Image (spheres, rainbow, N blue to C red):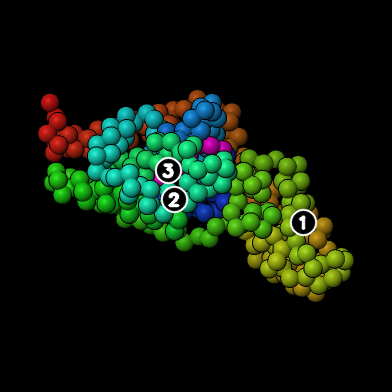
């Protein structure tokens, strides 16, 4: 039997190239090799979007269309909506008795995100909600209620997986060997940089190319991309490794063209404007098949709902089976 693998995405916006190269390509491999559960984590998205529920609701469908567009297949992936699996919330409550507030506050991932919120809101952390602080507990429930054996993560998410393992060990030590202790699958891809050279691509930074971007939007974004600041004139030699245009050529262009771009840039025989125009064409060609698949689902919204309903039903059956065992072990199977 295939091992169960679980991952989730927060529906707070469309997928961009960072998502595709950082996770999407791995998803395409996972759907072939594992029993793959993919959670649209709307409850987790509400921890810091509780005052904008329409945004979350809309993006549940938007992000599902993006995932289908990159090539994920509903007959190989269980797409499900987190809020439609009440067993997750139930298990989260039980887990709340197994982890202390101080342990959550020490979690490196949580500490980093709290620090970012303090910087953003300019206060001492009073805006941090109970739900936000406790999301690692909810995430542990996400993983274990489906018997998740493997969880794909980046380095920054490792503390969350360790927190989950601690909770599982604590539960099993009290109630018996009921739950599986998950293992991480570290991403082998590197984080995609933003058009401005920032190490992170994101909506809030305004430096991302989205899978849904049209040709005019892509043109505008690429024409504003960061290039080697030491190149003043068109025929000045430049360092392609200091140029985000070359960086994106390496993502979406052919090896032959990439080598040509690099050589001409170093010799000073390639102007930045021409280089950007070539990247715009390559980027549009790269995104075209994704956007064509996406249009099929845009034109058939009921199909997207059917895929989510089917995947959610499958996921709930798995969750109900786990909770039956959990309640029996906890002596609350009245």
Q: Is 137 on the left-hand or right-hand side of 328?
A: right
Question: Image quadrant of residue 73?
Answer: top left
The label nearer to you, 1 versus 3, is: 3
- Mark toward the start of the polypeptide (1 vs 2): 2
Please give the name of the residue rendered at 48% of the width and 30% of the height, measured from the top-left corner. 50
Question: Image quadrant of residue 204?
Answer: top right
> Could you tell me residue 28's position as x and y percent?
46, 50
Q: How many marks?
A: 3
Q: Is residue 27 magenta?
A: no
Residue under label 1, please give it: 276
Distance of mark 2 from mark 3, alpha carbons?
21 Å
Answer whether labels 1 and 2 touch (C-beta < 8 Å). no
Closest to the observer, 61 or 230: 230
Answer whether labels 1 and 3 touch (C-beta < 8 Å). no
Closest to the observer, 318 or 42: 42
The label nearer to you, 1 versus 2, is: 2
Mark 3 burial class by Cα count in 10 Å: few <14, some 14-19, many 20+: many
Closest to the observer, 92 or 286: 92
Distance of mark 1 from mark 2, alpha carbons?
39 Å
Dot 3 falls on a residue whose secondary structure is: strand
Q: Which residues are magenta?
A: 7-13
Residue under label 2, please give it: 111
Dot 2 falls on a residue whose secondary structure is: helix
């Amino acid at each position: 039997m295939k091992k169960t693998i679980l991952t989730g995405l927060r529906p707070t916006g469309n997928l961009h190239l960072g998502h595709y190269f950082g996770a999407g390509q791995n998803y395409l491999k996972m759907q072939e090799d594992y029993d793959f559960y993919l959670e649209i984590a709307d409850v987790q998205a509400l921890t810091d979007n509780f005052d904008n529920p329409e945004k979350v609701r809309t993006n549940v469908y938007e992000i599902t269309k993006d995932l289908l567009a990159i090539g994920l297949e509903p007959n190989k992936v269980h797409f499900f909506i987190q809020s439609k699996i009440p067993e997750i919330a139930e298990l989260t409550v039980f887990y709340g008795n197994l982890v202390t507030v101080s342990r959550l506050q020490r979690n490196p991932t949580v500490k980093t995100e709290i620090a970012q919120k303090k910087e953003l809101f300019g206060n001492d952390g009073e805006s941090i909600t109970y739900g936000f602080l406790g999301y690692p507990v909810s995430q542990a429930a996400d993983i274990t209620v489906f018997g998740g054996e493997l969880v794909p993560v980046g380095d920054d998410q490792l503390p969350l997986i360790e927190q989950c393992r601690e909770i599982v060990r604590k539960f099993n030590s009290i109630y018996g060997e009921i739950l599986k202790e998950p293992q991480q699958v570290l991403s082998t891809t590197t984080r995609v940089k933003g058009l401005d050279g920032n190490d992170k691509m994101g909506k809030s930074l305004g430096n991302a190319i989205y899978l849904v971007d049209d040709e005019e939007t892509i043109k505008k974004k690429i024409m504003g991309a960061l290039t080697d600041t030491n190149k003043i004139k068109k025929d000045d030699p430049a360092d392609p490794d200091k140029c985000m245009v070359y960086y994106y050529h390496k993502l979406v262009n052919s090896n032959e063209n990439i080598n040509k771009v690099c050589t001409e840039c170093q010799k000073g025989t390639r102007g930045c404007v021409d280089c950007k125009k070539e990247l715009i064409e390559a980027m549009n060609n790269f995104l075209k098949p994704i956007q064509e698949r996406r249009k099929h689902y845009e034109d058939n919204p009921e199909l997207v709902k059917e895929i989510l309903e089917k995947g959610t039903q499958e996921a709930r059956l798995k969750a109900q089976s786990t909770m039956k065992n959990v309640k029996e072990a906890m002596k609350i199977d009245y």
